[in-house]
Amino acid sequence: MVLGILKINQMGASLQEIRPHFVQLWSLSVIYMLSAIGIVAYRKKKQIMLKQGYKERAKP
C-alpha cells in the first residue's frame, strides 16, 4: 500500500492503477486476521482441555 500511496502522491496515479496494491493489502489483512483468530481459538481450546483433564485426574 505504501507503493500505492507513493504512486498517487508523486506520480499522479489513479485509484484504478493502484487497485492491485490495495487488494493485496486487504488480502494479507484478512489472512492475518483469520490466522490470529485460529491461533486464539486453538489456545483457548487447549487451555480448556487441560483444565478438564486436571479436574478428572483430581477426582478419586
Image: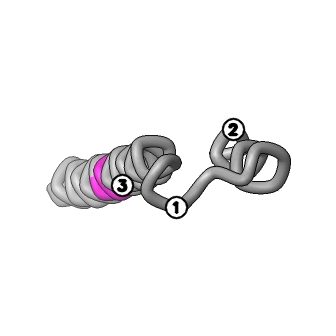
Question: Is residue 38 a member of the stretch shown in magenta?
Answer: yes
Observer-nearest of 48 and 40: 40
Q: Secondary structure at mark 1?
A: loop
Q: Which residue in the structure is indicated by mark 3?
A: 30
Which numbered marker is on residue 34?
A: none
Q: In the rendered structure, which disc, 2 or 1, sits on the residue that comes first in sequence?
A: 2
Q: Is residue 52 left or right of residue 34?
A: left
Quick check: 35 above or below 52? Answer: above
Q: Position of residue 15 (x, y in %)?
A: 52, 61
Quick check: 6 above or below 44? Answer: above
Which numbered marker is on residue 3?
A: 2
Q: Which residue in the structure is indicated by mark 1?
A: 15
Q: Quadrant of the C terminus?
A: bottom left
What residue do we see at 41% from left, 43% from top? 20
What residue do we see at 81% from left, 55% from top? 9
Q: Which residues are magenta?
A: 37-41
User: Which amino acid, mark 3?
Assistant: Val
Quick check: 15 above or below 47? Answer: below
Label 1 vs label 3: CA separation? 21 Å
Magenta region, mostly helix, strand or loop? helix
